[in-house]
Image: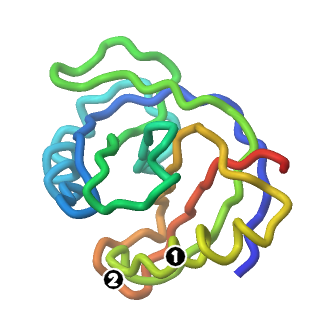
Amino acid sequence: MKPEIKTLTAKTLIGKRITMSLANNKTSELWKSFMPRRNEIKNVIGTDLFSIQTYSPDYFKVFNPNNEFEKWALLEVSDTTPLPEGMETFNLPGGLYAVFFYKGLNTDFSIFNYIFSEWLPKSEYNLDLRPHFEVLGSKYKNNDPESEEEIWIPIKNK
């Protein structure tokens, strides 16, 4: 599976976040709290949902499933006002990304194993310290093997 290399322009998003680890995965809790309230967000651009992860600079140095990170459920907006109560603004910086087009269950993490242990080490890129994210577009179907999403991995030249 070969990714497309794309340059992302900065985006402004609104949504909710939660601190979690892979061992204490709270993704379902986050999305269950966000989805019923997503229509409260005004000035939305498009229909895509964004699932964003932010990691500390040393998160990937030694893998530990108990290491915590922030996960966000978001929509892109043209203006952050009004900001719904209990939601926050997220500024996604632009930059170079490897974009993988994934089809399958959202519980199958083998794609990430491939990206980080096979593709990235053999590529001409290093991981960059920017947010990682998935775009959940019109072909995304939660818990469906026919679901499709885009996986955006921040990269920089070696």
Say whether residue 156 is left or right of residue 53: right
**On-image quarter of the N terminus:** bottom right
**Figure quadrant of residue 115:** bottom right
**Horizontal relation, residue 120 to residue 149: left or right:** right
Amino acid type of the residue tagged 1 in the rendering: Asn
What residue is shown at x 39% (from left), y 87% (from top)? 145
The residue drawn where x is 60% and y is 38% is 129
Task: Tell me where residue 40 appears, x and y as whole percent.
Answer: 24, 30
Q: Is 62 left or right of 64, judged from the image as shown?
A: right
Q: Nearer the viewer, mark 1 or mark 2?
A: 1
| Residue 10 x %, y % | 64, 29
Which label is found at residue 144? 2
Q: Secondary structure at mark 2?
A: loop
Q: Which mark is residue 113?
A: 1
Q: Residues within 10 Å of mark 2 (few under 14, many from 20)?
A: few
Task: Give the residue drawn at x 85%, y 60%.
Answer: 124
Mark 1 vs mark 2, CA separation in Å: 20 Å
Vertical relation: 84 (above or below) 112: above
